[in-house]
Image (cartoon, rainbow, N blue to C red):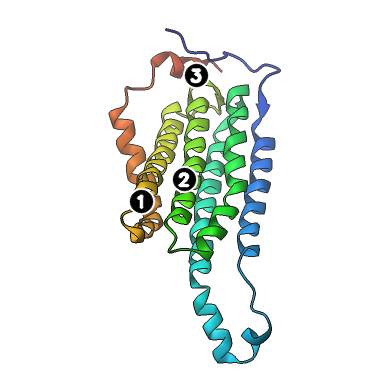
Amino acid sequence: MTDNVASAPSAKDSSAPRMGAFTDAVLAIASTLLVIEIKRPEGAELAGPHALAEFLWDEKASFVAFVLAFFLLWSVWRRHHHFIDEIDRLDRATAAAHAPLLLFAAFLPFPTAVFGHAADNKLAACLFAASAAALFGSEAVMKEFAWRRAILRPGVDPQKIRISANASASVTLVFVVTAGLVWVAPWIWLIWFLAPLAATAGGKLLDRLRPAVPARIRERQAER
């Protein structure tokens, strides 16, 4: 069975820097929208230090949700930044796979606001986990296309891209599992702060469990 990997750039290939710039813009806007959803104190809530302190304490879940979502988006940006630096040209499938990634990144402020305003609501927690799973899952799929089909920069090993895809898949698994567990253990969302550890350890572990990168893919990348 042959892999659908182009041996040379074509008109269907896309500029990696342009895709990187567009992704940066979407992630920056999504990160900014997170703070807009945090409720502002008004009227009596600003009457004095005690009233303001009570307001800030009542809104603590919104601040926690903001910090969590911000670092999730930041982790996506950081990995994508390194990813783009290793790509010469994006094939059409890898470029198209950016669409769901950016879609779920742009959507994340909504479940973050819902979860922040109703952290004890199991459905709100489930919605956030499902949205995060979709975000990291689409990231994993995009990178799966990339290591098989994109034109990498000279000296870049396709396995490095695959390990990054595995890391995204590991984080996806964390959110998929916890989306179900929130219904029986509402505190399980605390595990989401450990998601970066899943990316680091899970990426390498999954890569060991998968078959080796086919020699033909390494050879085709070398020919480019």
Dividing the picture into quarters, in which one does residue 170 lie? top left
Q: Which residue is mark 2?
A: 130
Q: Earlier in the sequence, mark 3 or mark 2?
A: 2
**Relative to 126, is 108 on the left or the right?**
right
**Mark 1: which secondary structure?**
helix
Residue at the location (57% across, 38% down)? 101
Cα distance in 3D space between marks 3 and 1? 32 Å
Number of numbered discs visible in the structure rendering: 3
**Mark 2: which secondary structure?**
helix
Residue at the location (44% across, 37% down)? 164
Q: Is residue 140 above or below residue 194?
A: above
* Mark 2 crowd level (few <14, some 14–19, many ≥20, 10 Å Cα): some
**Mark 3: which secondary structure?**
helix
Cα distance in 3D space between marks 3 and 2? 39 Å
Disc number for residue 131: none
Disc number for residue 197: 1
In front: label 3 or label 1: 1
Q: Which residue is mark 3?
A: 222
